[in-house]
Amino acid sequence: MKVSGETKIIGIFGYPVTHSLSPLFQNAAFEALGLNFVYLPFLVKPEDLKGAVESIKSLNMVGVNVTIPHKKKVLVYLDELSSEAKMMGAVNTICYRDGKLIGYNTDGKGFISSLTKEGKFNPQGKRALILGAGGAAWAISFALIEAGVKRLNIANRTIKKAEILLERLKEFFQDKCEITLIDFDKVNSSIVMNEVDLLINATSVGMHPEDSLLINPELLAPHTFVYDVVYNKKTKLLKAAEDRNLPCLGGLGMLVYQGAYSFEIWTHKKAPLKEMKEVLKEQEKCFVT
Ligand code: ATR
């Protein structure tokens, strides 16, 4: 990559940001298409977020990704929001266009593309159980309902957070789907698990080798598809699903597809998925399914 006077700048705002894989695969994508763009990590402290967002305009950047812990707080500094960003109250992509900062959220779409294209699983009419109520769970829940799941069960260690998510989902999708909360300590029952077509681990459990399983794998029904958003390794949950010959996927696809949608918002070009995945395969801390 040659940086010139015409190079267009994109970045990621996060705190921390060093762990982010986005610079790696976004720059690989620019290179693959011969685009004169560069993607840089920016360590932005919470108290500096307003100034950082304003700098997108003042530095005439194309846009940025926004990650932990800024995805919700950034909304107030933007001029416009996409319908997804409005619903979820969270932004992961900003585009600076015609003097305006526009906020998008590509996480949910990224999940659905990974699930349907890589996993060949069609969520329409299915019963899903999601573990977690953090940022990933929010994006996935909205996207799954929009994609037509018949039932969505949510279980989170902290019940209050699950209740907030439920309330928000009901606000937007009153009758579109049957949405219920399940006590976190009650998910490990065959009655619950037998009725699950799609199990999603949207918690961070599984990232560390010492993490224990949240679900007893013996309870996984033979018709269940298992999706684990953790992408840095093959988690115990995925290993157990594989041992049971169940269809399953790790979270790297979601990461790549959300990035691909961001890429397309900024460049108006089709993202080179193959090259984006390829560069991640070379990374030790990635588990590519
Ligand atoms: P992300 O944006 O990646 O979803 P997050 O917003 O910090 O990250 O959410 C992390 C999720 O993992 C939460 O649902 C969290 O549960 P709590 O709401 O109870 O904190 C869940 N989580 C993290 N560690 C967990 C553990 N040891 N057991 C169960 N759930 C856990």
Image (spheres, helix red, strand yellow):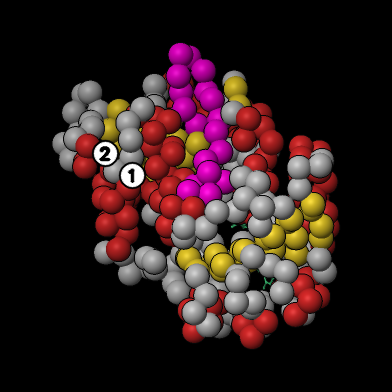
Q: Position of residue 53 (x, y in %)?
A: 52, 30
Residue at 68% x, 60% y is 128
Q: Quadrant of ligand 1?
A: bottom right
Residue 104 inside the magenta-drawn segment: yes
Secondary structure under tag 1 reads helix
The residue lying furthest to the top in this view is 98
| Disc 1 to disc 2, C-alpha distance | 6 Å
Q: Position of residue 285 (x, y in %)?
A: 38, 68
Asked which quadrant contains residue 157, the reply is: bottom right
Residue at 19% x, 35% y is 34
Estimate how packed mark 1 is, as few (under 14), some (14 to 19) or many (20 or more) residues with alpha carbons within 10 Å.
many
Secondary structure under tag 2 reads helix
Up/down of 135 relative to 39, above or below: below
Residue at 38% x, 37% y is 263
Q: Position of residue 282 (x, y in %)?
A: 27, 64
Report the magenta residues as a range: 94-113
Q: Amino acid at mark 2?
A: Phe
Residue at label 2? 30
Residue at label 1? 26
Asked which quadrant contains residue 27, the reply is: top left
Ligand 1 near label 1 (Cβ, under 8 Å)?
no
Q: Position of residue 91 (x, y in %)?
A: 58, 38
The answer to whether residue 205 of the structure is visible from this angle is no
Q: Amino acid at mark 1?
A: Gln
Q: Are marks 1 and 2 in contact (CB under 8 Å)?
A: yes
